Amino acid sequence: MAVLTAGVIWDAVRVPYGVLGVDVEQGNEPEALRARLEELGLSGPAFCDPYRPFLYVLVPPGTDREWPLTLAPAGVECLGGTRPYVHYVGVPRVDRLGPPGLYWVTLPDGSSRFTDSRHLFQVLHARLEESAPLRDASTVRLAVVRET
């Protein structure tokens, strides 16, 4: 593992497994995580911390300056190098493709291609919308009464 400064070559979006789907929470096997990313249409380098339930998706540097904070309550955070909040991220060695320890779910290919940050945000936002608890009947009724 190496500790690298985010925001120089890439930013990292830290995503709790729960945001990606319940099936991932129950097991963080590399194949399950790869399959889930593929199902969600996410490509680009990503690595996993099996000791904490987080997946780190690498996005272009500077993404942290424009990343909306609307996903922060769900534990999604963009780690970048925008001052004063420079982040340092532990990154697995390139030969680490499975546990134990940090490992790559999708290896960087050397092309400097990262996950599209806007697409990533849309996918995560949609996942959270799907899993949001339904409003109770009194809230819905109040909204209908006020509209009429």
Image (cartoon, rainbow, N blue to C red):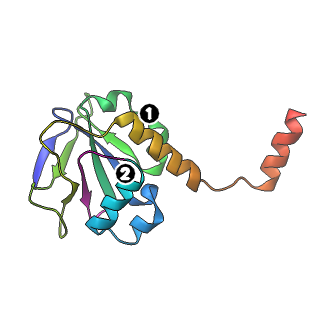
The crowding category of the residue bearing disc 2, from other C-alpha atoms within 10 Å (few below 14, some 14 to 19, many at least 20), is many
Which residue is painted at 23% across and 47% down in the image? 45
Return the residue nearer the eye: 24 or 70.
24
Q: Is residue 44 magenta?
A: yes
Q: Picture coordinates of residue 41 (x, y %)?
A: 39, 48
Quarter holding the C terminus? top right
Which residue is painted at 40% across and 47% down in the image? 76
The crowding category of the residue bearing disc 1, from other C-alpha atoms within 10 Å (few below 14, some 14 to 19, many at least 20), is few
Tell me the residue that label 1 is attached to.
Answer: 68
Amino acid beneath label 2: Val
Confirm whether residue 16 shows in the render. no
Q: Which residues are magenta?
A: 42-53
Q: Which mark is residue 111?
A: none
What secondary structure is the magenta-colored segment mainly? loop
Which residue is painted at 45% across and 36% down in the image? 69
Q: Secondary structure at mark 2?
A: strand
Amino acid beneath label 1: Pro
Q: Is 112 on the left-hand or right-hand side of 55?
A: left
Tell me the residue that label 2 is attached to.
Answer: 15
Q: Picture coordinates of residue 111 (x, y %)?
A: 14, 37
How far is the residue under mark 1 from the one under mark 2? 14 Å
Quarter holding the N terminus? bottom left
Of mark 1 and mark 2, the one earlier in the sequence is 2
Q: Picture coordinates of residue 91 (x, y %)?
A: 16, 51
Q: Is residue 79 magenta?
A: no
Which residue is painted at 30% across and 46% down in the image? 43
Q: Is 139 on the left-hand or right-hand side of 56?
A: right
Q: Picture coordinates of residue 33 (x, y %)?
A: 32, 61
Image vertical order of residue 51 relative to residue 38, above or below: below
